[in-house]
Image (cartoon, rainbow, N blue to C red):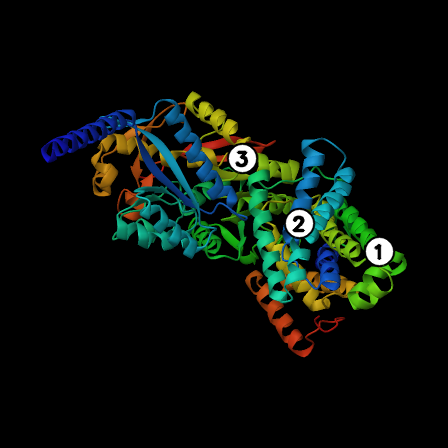
């Protein structure tokens, strides 16, 4: 009797185990397609939401395109890309806890943060946990050894600024230049670097100490003083997307007839909507979405972004390079890079991918040896463009030094 | 210097309009509405949507900004502040409630309106030159309208039955109730009037500045600063506070390095409040 009960119990256990094994096997088969979780950490609210928010949206739209195509193949497996966005609110503490949150969720690759102070704060978490991130911040200490986990995802202000000033000297006869920035660490740093670059080129810097407070609505008072120094050109250093239109409008209303520029990514439609015709001729560094240079693939991405978020933002044409090269590199290195970012880093020097966003194609690789001593910058093209009736018209396209 | 003085006039007038709404709510409810800036921002977006997206006249959008944000304020009073104030007497609870509302409105606005700055087509074109100073016509229109709105509000508060009831409630709620005034209705109306003014100022000023979803916090801080200078809960004090801040800001930017301007303004306000804690025209808190 006992023996029969034992046999029945053993049989039952075998059946349960068999069923469990079957379910496990079936489950494994059903979930053969795995998920690659990638983070986006940046300022997604407040005046700078035009950067971090767009960065997150860009990544989500690009991920949507990959996923619609069946996912990204890394080694033998195909992965659906899942983007986890965390808003650091432009606060260094928020960036650190945001980075910790992403790391605790097993995220190894992150886009952002968007400012020097937040990127510096997140850096400690990135370095300690071997997490790769692509900040859109220009502090050199993020990318110079001994730091190794951060890769600059765009062109830095000190790289594009002198290029713009030189072009202005040669093409517009600019001799006197003024800088105005928000009274915050990042814009002030960019202003100082820009001013030093302008002086090195032989320009006369007539004003580089004027700043306005965050949240300023009326720029007449500050610009009255700046324009009083009679500059040929005004640089809006590190200007937030929410301030650029009102600043241009106020400068023109005060009678300033010279040229104006910024080194940060801006959306021409938004600028034009606020400043109207006064925005025409405003020079900014940007992505590769202008009609003259974009590829069919960029058009496809613009359509996707517009479908997802209701409206195109030109800054997305800049942010799309980061996730693109990140995924291309992971595909090139293979599955080992998914867990171990050392393998990813080891590939940076030799990696050469394809730039799908430019009409003329070209390479997508890691540069930065000249400025940072190691390959820690994405080879985003230097696209200098000017606003024309709400669109960007490219002035020239340059390349970052290796 | 003429330009600096004109700048001060424009900034002061716009600030005065912004400060009025927050001081009305404070005077009748004893609530420091930290969501004032967010309501200003919503007012700006209301005008943007009516004028740019739906193609309706700017002035229609402006009326709608007052009505929509005013109704939002009535809802806030009825469903948020009133239930809380009935159960809790501690002032910090309503302040926290206002702060929470501000965060909620800003987050919601980001989802609904997106991250871009928005502007409307100019309501007037051209520049007027005055002793070498430049004043865009659009700004002149805004100053005139703002001045008219301020005058209309003062007349409403000073000479209408409802306005007198609001003043009475601000002075003594119990005595006002004993006179047969419906305090529940009046509170909701007063709160709605205050928030409607925030919406109206946001809607009017979008014509010369721009609006974005993150604009609210800085506006709230400045509005708070203005009523501290002028005297919390006093309408004329709010107007004066707006002009004082506008003057300090414009002259400060002209004479000092930009980074020092607000540092010195805050220093002046701190010193001033030590000497006169109730502001220029203020009454004691509460």
Question: Which of pointers 2 and 1 lies earlier in the amino acid sequence?
Answer: 2
The residue that disc 1 covers is: B151
Q: Secondary structure at mark 2?
A: helix
Report x, y in % for residue B139: 75, 48
| Badge 2: chain ID | B
Q: Which mark is residue A126?
A: none
User: In the displayed image of the protein, which residue is found farthest to the left?
Assistant: A3
Q: Is residue A246 left or right of residue A358?
A: right
Comparing marks 2 and 1, which lies closer to the viewer? 2
The residue that disc 3 covers is: A386
Q: Are marks 3 and 1 in contact (CB under 8 Å)?
A: no
Residue nearest the observer in this picture, A320 or A143: A320
Report x, y in % for residue B274: 64, 77
Identify whether A87 is placed above or below A306.
below
The residue that disc 2 covers is: B39
Q: Residue at x 60, y 55 (%)?
A: B218
Comparing marks 3 and 1, which lies closer to the viewer? 1
Q: Residue at x 45, y 42 (%)?
A: A166
Q: Quadrant of residue B32?
A: bottom right
Residues at marks 3 and 2 on the same chain? no
Q: CA distance from mark 3 to mark 2?
A: 35 Å
* Residue B100 visible here: yes
Q: Residues within 10 Å of mark 2 (few under 14, many from 20)?
A: many
Quadrant of the drawing holding the N terminus of chain A: top left
* Residue A264 visible here: no
Residues at marks 3 and 1 on the same chain? no
Q: CA distance from mark 2 to mark 1?
A: 22 Å
């Amino acid at each position: 009797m006992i023996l029969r009960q034992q046999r029945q119990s053993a049989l039952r256990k075998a059946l349960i185990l068999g069923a469990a094994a079957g379910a496990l096997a079936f489950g494994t088969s059903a979930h053969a397609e795995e998920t690659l979780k990638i983070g986006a950490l940046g300022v997604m609210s407040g005046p700078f939401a035009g950067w971090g928010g767009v960065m997150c949206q860009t990544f989500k739209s690009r991920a949507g395109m990959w996923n619609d195509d069946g996912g990204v193949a890394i080694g033998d497996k195909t992965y659906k890309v899942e983007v986890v966005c965390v808003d650091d609110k432009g606060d260094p503490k928020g960036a650190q806890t945001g980075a910790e949150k992403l790391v605790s969720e097993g995220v190894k690759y992150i886009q952002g943060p968007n400012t020097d102070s937040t990127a510096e704060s997140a850096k400690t978490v990135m370095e300690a946990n071997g997490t790769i991130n692509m900040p859109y911040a220009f502090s050199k200490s993020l990318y110079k050894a001994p730091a190794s986990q951060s890769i600059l995802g765009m062109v830095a202000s000190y790289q594009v600024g002198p290029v713009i000033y030189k072009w202005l000297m040669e093409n517009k006869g600019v001799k006197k230049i003024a800088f105005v920035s928000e009274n915050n660490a990042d814009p002030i740093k960019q202003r100082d670097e820009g001013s030093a670059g302008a002086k090195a080129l032989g320009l006369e810097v007539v004003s580089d100490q004027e700043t306005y407070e965050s949240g300023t609505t009326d720029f007449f008072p500050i610009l009255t003083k700046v324009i009083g120094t009679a500059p040929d050109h005004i640089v809006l250093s590190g200007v937030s997307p929410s301030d650029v239109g009102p600043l241009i409008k106020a400068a023109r209303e005060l009678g300033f007839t010279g040229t104006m520029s910024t080194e940060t990514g801006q959306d021409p439609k938004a600028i034009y909507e606020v400043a109207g015709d006064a925005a025409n001729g405003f020079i900014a560094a940007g992505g590769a979405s202008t009609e003259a240079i974009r590829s069919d693939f960029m058009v496809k991405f613009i359509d996707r972004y517009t479908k997802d978020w209701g409206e195109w933002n030109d800054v997305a044409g800049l942010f799309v390079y980061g996730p693109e090269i990140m995924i291309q590199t992971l595909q090139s290195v293979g599955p080992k890079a998914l867990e171990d970012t050392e393998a990813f880093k080891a590939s940076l020097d030799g990696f050469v991918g394809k730039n799908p966003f430019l009409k003329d194609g070209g390479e997508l690789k890691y540069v930065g040896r000249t400025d940072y001593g190691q390959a820690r910058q994405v080879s985003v093209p230097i696209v200098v463009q000017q606003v024309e009736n709400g669109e960007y018209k490219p002035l020239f396209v340059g390349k970052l030094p290796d | 210097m003429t330009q600096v003085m004109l700048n001060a006039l424009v900034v002061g007038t716009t600030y005065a309009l912004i400060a009025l709404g927050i001081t009305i709510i404070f005077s009748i409810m004893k609530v420091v509405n930290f969501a004032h800036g967010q309501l200003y921002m919503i007012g700006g977006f209301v005008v943007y949507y009516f004028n740019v997206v739906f193609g309706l006249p700017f002035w229609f959008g402006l009326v709608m900004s007052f009505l929509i944000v005013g109704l939002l304020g009535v809802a806030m009073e009825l469903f948020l502040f009133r239930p809380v104030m009935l159960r809790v007497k501690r002032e910090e609870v309503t302040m926290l409630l206002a702060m929470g509302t501000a965060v909620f409105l800003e987050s919601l606005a980001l989802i609904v309106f997106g991250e871009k700055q928005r502007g409307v087509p100019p309501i007037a074109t051209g520049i007027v030159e005055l002793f070498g100073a430049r004043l865009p016509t659009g700004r002149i229109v805004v100053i005139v309208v703002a001045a008219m709105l301020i005058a209309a509000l003062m007349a409403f508060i000073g000479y209408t039955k409802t306005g007198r009831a609001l003043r009475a409630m601000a002075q003594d709620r119990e005595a006002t109730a004993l006179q047969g005034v419906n305090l529940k209705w009046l509170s909701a109306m007063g709160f709605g009037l205050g928030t409607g003014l925030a919406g109206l100022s946001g809607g009017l000023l979008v014509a010369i500045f721009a609006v974005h979803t993150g604009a609210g916090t800085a506006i709230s801080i400045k509005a708070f600063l203005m009523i501290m200078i002028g005297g919390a809960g006093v309408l004329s004090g709010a107007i004066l506070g707006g002009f004082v801040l506008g003057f300090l800001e414009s002259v400060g930017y002209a004479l000092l390095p930009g980074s020092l301007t607000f540092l010195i303004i805050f220093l002046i306000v701190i010193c001033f409040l030590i000497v006169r804690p109730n502001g220029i025209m203020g009454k004691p808190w509460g």
